[in-house]
């Protein structure tokens, strides 16, 4: 500075020097222009993180676990359904055990020993044998008494044979003298009980009687019969008129 320079001139020089000494890139434009590729990558990563956080929040709001696992509420329902199925299975098992026990007790009751209730084939056989035998021994003609008595000996035994012999002894002479004819049919035979080789039956008979050339008369008879299996054949051992 030269001696004698005015004050205003010195201030102007100072301002000029200050303006020339300002560092480049310190202004706003310089700050914006100074962002390189690294800064842009960092900004993109920050955006992706924010998006992921938003997606996680949406998944939480919809009730789904981002890892794909079921919600706790769904797991609770599944466990409850499993418990219900297990309880139903146990109840069915217990019911089956009770039914089996009851079936076993029924097999040991007195009614179970009665094969008339459980064995239809055996019941049909005894009713057929007894019904046919009674129809034969209570049917006779004046000239056929011998055949009727032979049938009675084959079909009757024990007390029933003695009862029949006493009955036929009373009517034998009347049959020949009065020309009596008797025709008997078994219309219904019911097996009341069938245990082992012994059966009790209720037999309904229709009988048609005729004296000589006279008019036929029809009557019904009902008998309680006890039969026993002997040599493979059911034979009547007791007869009672009802």
Image: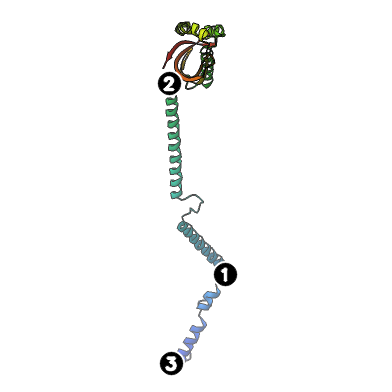
Task: Label 1: state its secondary structure.
Answer: loop
Kindly identify the residue that appears in the image at 49 percent across and 61 percent down. Answer: 54
**Disc 2 vs disc 1: which is toward the camera?**
2
Quadrant of the rendered structure where residue 6 is? bottom left
Residue 194 percent location from the top left of the image: 47, 17
Quadrant of the rendered structure where residue 94 is? top left
Tell me if residue 23 can be seen: no
Pointer 1 residue: 36
Residue nearest the observer in this picture, 114 or 208:
208
Residue 107 percent location from the top left of the image: 44, 21
Kindly identify the residue that appears in the image at 51 percent across and 62 percent down. Answer: 51
Mark sitting earlier along the chain (2/1): 1
**Disc 1 vs disc 3: which is toward the camera?**
1
Task: Label 3: state its secondary structure.
Answer: helix
How far apart are labels 2 and 3 at the CA level?
145 Å
Tell me if residue 61 can be seen: yes
Mark sitting earlier along the chain (1/3): 3
Residue 183 percent location from the top left of the image: 53, 16
Residue 239 percent location from the top left of the image: 44, 12
In the rendered structure, find residue 111 and report the number of the disc placed on it: 2
Kindly identify the residue that appears in the image at 50 percent across and 84 percent down. Answer: 19
Pointer 3 residue: 7
Residue nearest the observer in this picture, 158 or 47:
158
């Amino acid at each position: 500075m030269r001696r004698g320079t005015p004050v205003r001139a010195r201030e102007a020089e100072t301002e000029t020097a200050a303006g020339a000494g300002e560092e480049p890139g310190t202004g706003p434009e310089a700050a914006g222009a100074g962002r390189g590729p690294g800064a842009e990558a960092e900004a993109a990563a920050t955006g992706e993180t924010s998006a992921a956080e938003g997606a996680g929040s949406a998944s939480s709001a919809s009730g789904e676990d981002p890892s794909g696992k079921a919600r706790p509420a769904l797991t609770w329902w599944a466990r409850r359904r499993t418990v219900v199925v297990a309880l139903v299975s146990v109840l069915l098992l217990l019911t089956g055990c009770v039914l089996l026990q009851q079936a076993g007790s029924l097999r040991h009751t007195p009614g179970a020993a009665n094969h008339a209730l459980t064995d239809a084939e055996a019941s049909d056989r005894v009713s057929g044998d007894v019904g046919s035998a009674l129809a034969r021994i209570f049917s006779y003609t004046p000239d056929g008494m011998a055949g009727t008595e032979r049938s009675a000996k084959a079909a009757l035994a024990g007390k029933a044979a003695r009862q029949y012999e006493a009955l036929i002894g009373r009517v034998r002479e009347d049959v020949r003298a009065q020309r009596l004819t008797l025709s008997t049919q078994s219309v219904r035979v019911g097996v009341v009980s069938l245990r082992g080789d012994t059966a009790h039956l209720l037999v309904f008979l229709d009988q048609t009687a005729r004296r000589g050339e006279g008019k036929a008369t029809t009557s019904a008879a009902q008998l309680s019969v006890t039969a026993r299996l002997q040599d493979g054949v059911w034979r009547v051992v007791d007869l009672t008129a009802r």
